Amino acid sequence: MEQEFKQCLESKKVVPFARGKNLVKKELSVAKSDISEAKAGYENERYKWSTIQGYYAMFHAARALIYSQGYREKSHYCLAVALRAVFVDEGNMEAQLVRDFLNAMNLREAADYEAEFSRSGAKAVIASAEKFIKKAAAILNIGE
């Protein structure tokens, strides 16, 4: 098991979550709703909110994935660590998707906390989110 994942577990930033398996479909549904909202915002030139909603689409899809394995995050960063440990290291997900998640997280934080956002950033987050959700649905064997 990856050292960083162990640290997230020890610091309780990733915790066991037995109820998670019952919430997988709901989280993936929220992800799909968020990506729809992100696309609509983008079309209306609301790049800040489309960046934020695009990230949260990825966040909820990532949550669905770790919920399926009986974990819950208490940290956005440790969610990425858990994805890498549980899905990438096991060969079920490309490392690039986790890097895209972290990039989207950084763009969301810049948009949310520093009012720094752009059309190109929003577009990148949306594109990444679409790929991420598609992969999550495939891993979870839940139709798009």
Image (cartoon, grey):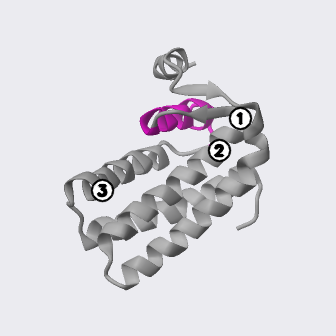
Please give left or right for residue 63 compared with residue 39 in the image: right
Q: Which residue is mark 1?
A: 69
Label 3 vs 2, first from the N-terminus: 2
Q: Are marks 3 and 1 in contact (CB under 8 Å)?
A: no
Q: Which residue is mark 2?
A: 65
Residues packed near mark 2 inside 10 Å, few (<14), some (14 to 19) or many (20 plus): many
Answer whether residue 82 is magenta in the image.
yes
Q: Which residue is mark 3?
A: 112
Instruction: Name the residue: 67% across, 62% down.
Output: 29
Instruction: Name the residue: 75% across, 65% down.
Output: 143
Please give left or right for residue 118 compared with residue 35 in the image: left
Eye-nearest disc, 3 or 2: 3
**Secondary element at image label 2:** helix
Residue 140 position, x and y percent, is: 73, 50
Eye-nearest disc, 3 or 1: 3
Work out how far the residue at label 2 is from the one at label 1, CA to CA, in angstroms.
7 Å
Task: Specify the amino acid type for callout 1.
Answer: Gln
Residue 31 position, x and y percent, is: 59, 61
Stretch of the chain drawn in magenta: 76-92
**Secondary element at image label 3:** helix
Answer whether residue 57 is magenta in the image.
no
